[in-house]
């Protein structure tokens, strides 16, 4: 693949100096196609390489380490030299109790938010994914799979209420013709990412979009009885239209962090209403002159939607601050360790 096919654009080109390209140790741009533990697979103009993440990289905060979709500069020996600024990045709070950030993917143009036309369909979960997309300024597309198993009409209508102009497409992911409308987001230079709960058909969709079987799907997986996740590494795959698609495994749990502006965008209708409340700090509970409460009463605002906004805001604020605190403690720890070392060095000199 050449650089254009890999998604190279002026935003990245502008980050290179003449010295980077033509200095004594010329560097070349490469796209991170896969990350598995400390092994990073990259593609560049005319080739591929596998690079081991050196300790100096591994010691950096998660956000400064390469993730799938990143652009990096590599040395003639295929070593990772520099991470370029990202046009967009998806992150979440790491699963479990760990107060840390986990990157999902970078430099994505379109987020395919996958849900199925069955009990998996959940407006509050879609709002969660929408916040992720809008915060990263990535175009969201809601894909409703398994439209062959149920009447998709009501699901389509409901999903469309989430946001004016939102693209919502119902498909049978097993059939190539059915997913044709999705190809408009898959053209050369474009990068698409897939998110959605386990079992909704992400791998099936990926295989049908690519036209070959690159991902093991649930149907095959069921007999290995090894649990629900077979997709282990995040990787970018080439699409026949010329674009790239990122499969994000293990997205059963998407805990929000640092997406407050994305949330404000998803729920801008509620924020707009709140502008009219009598009190500036109205909590929309029992305050007089509350326009939000009036809208609820009039049936113009869904109570579920208001509750979910509050819930996601709390979650985002909690995770953002606990991660920031942990980073602060880590920085202080380093500072103390350095201070101690300087004191010892000084004593040794005396
Ligand atoms: N009938 C039908 N089955 C589907 C569709 N999409 C996925 N499946 C099935 O749903 C199961 C889970 O799909 P999979 O792609 O593994 O889901 P993932 O966990 O999101 O990657 C598999 O048995 C697929 O064959 C669809 O649009 N229609
Ligand atoms: Mg899968
Ligand atoms: Zn109010």
Image: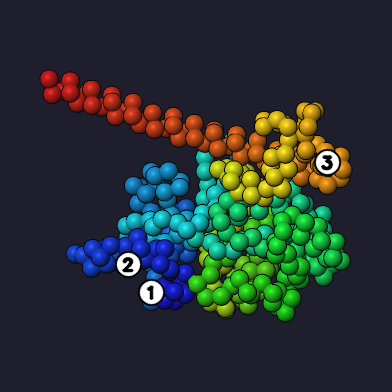
In the image: residue 156, left or right of residue 229: right
Q: Residue at x 65, y 35 (%)?
A: 314
Q: CA distance from mark 1 to mark 2?
A: 9 Å
Q: CA distance from mark 2 to mark 3?
A: 56 Å
Residue wearing tag 3: 296
Residue wearing tag 1: 45
Q: Residue at x 44, y 29 (%)?
A: 329
When the figure is inspected, residue 148 is found, relative to residue 285, above or below; the finding is below
Element on which disc 2 rests = strand
Residue wearing tag 2: 28
At label 2, counting other C-alpha atoms closer than 10 Å, the crowd grade (few under 14, some 14-19, many 20 or more) is: some
Any mark on residue 203, and which?
none
When the figure is inspected, residue 2 is found, relative to residue 59, above or below; the finding is below
Residue 298 appears at what percent x and percent y? 87, 43
Q: Is label 2 or label 3 in front?
A: 3
Q: Are marks 1 and 2 in contact (CB under 8 Å)?
A: yes
- The disc, 3 or 1, on the residue closer to the chain's N-terminal end is 1
In the image: residue 192, left or right of residue 202: left
Q: What is the quadrant of the C terminus in the image? A: top left
Residue 23 appears at what percent x and percent y? 21, 65
Element on which disc 3 rests = helix
Q: Residue at x 83, y 47 (%)?
A: 300
At label 3, counting other C-alpha atoms closer than 10 Å, the crowd grade (few under 14, some 14-19, many 20 or more) is: some
- The disc, 2 or 3, on the residue closer to the chain's N-terminal end is 2
Q: Is mark 3 within 8 Å of ligand 3?
A: no
Residue 255 appears at what percent x and percent y? 62, 44
Q: What is the quadrant of the N terminus in the image? A: bottom left
* Quadrant assignment, res 303: top right
Toward the left, the furthest residue is 350
- The disc, 1 or 2, on the residue closer to the chain's N-terminal end is 2
């Amino acid at each position: 693949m050449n650089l254009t096919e890999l998604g190279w654009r002026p935003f990245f080109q502008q980050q290179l100096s003449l010295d980077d390209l033509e200095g004594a140790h010329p560097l070349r741009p490469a796209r991170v196609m896969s990350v598995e533990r400390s092994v990073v697979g990259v593609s560049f103009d005319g080739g591929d390489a596998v690079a081991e993440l050196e300790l100096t990289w591994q010691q950096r905060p998660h956000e400064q380490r390469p993730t799938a979709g990143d652009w990096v500069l590599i040395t003639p020996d295929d070593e990772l030299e520099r991470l370029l600024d990202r046009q967009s990045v998806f992150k979440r709070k790491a699963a479990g109790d760990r107060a840390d950030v986990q990157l999902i993917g970078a430099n994505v143009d379109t987020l395919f938010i996958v849900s199925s036309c069955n009990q998996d369909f959940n407006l509050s979960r879609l709002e969660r994914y929408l916040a992720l997309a809008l915060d990263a300024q990535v175009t969201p597309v809601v894909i409703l799979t398994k439209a062959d198993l149920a009447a998709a009409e009501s699901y389509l209508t409901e999903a469309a209420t989430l946001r004016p102009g939102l693209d919502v497409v119902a498909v049978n992911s097993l059939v190539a013709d059915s997913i044709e409308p999705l190809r408009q987001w898959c053209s050369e230079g474009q990068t698409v990412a897939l998110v959605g709960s386990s079992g909704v058909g992400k791998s099936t969709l990926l295989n049908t979009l690519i036209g070959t079987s690159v991902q093991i799907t649930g149907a095959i997986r069921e007999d290995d009885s090894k649990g629900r996740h077979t997709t282990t590494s995040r990787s970018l795959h080439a699409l026949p239209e010329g674009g790239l698609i990122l499969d994000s495994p293990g997205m059963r749990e998407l805990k929000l962090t640092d997406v407050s502006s994305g949330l404000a965008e998803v729920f801008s209708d509620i924020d707009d209403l709140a502008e009219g409340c009598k009190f500036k700090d109205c909590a929309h509970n029992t305050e007089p002159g509350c326009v939000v409460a009036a809208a609820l009463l009039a049936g113009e605002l869904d109570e579920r939607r208001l509750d979910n906004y509050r819930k996601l805001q709390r979650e985002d604020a909690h995770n953002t601050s606990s991660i920031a605190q942990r980073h602060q403690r880590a920085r202080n720890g380093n500072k103390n360790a350095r201070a101690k070392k300087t004191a010892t060095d000084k004593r040794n000199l005396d």
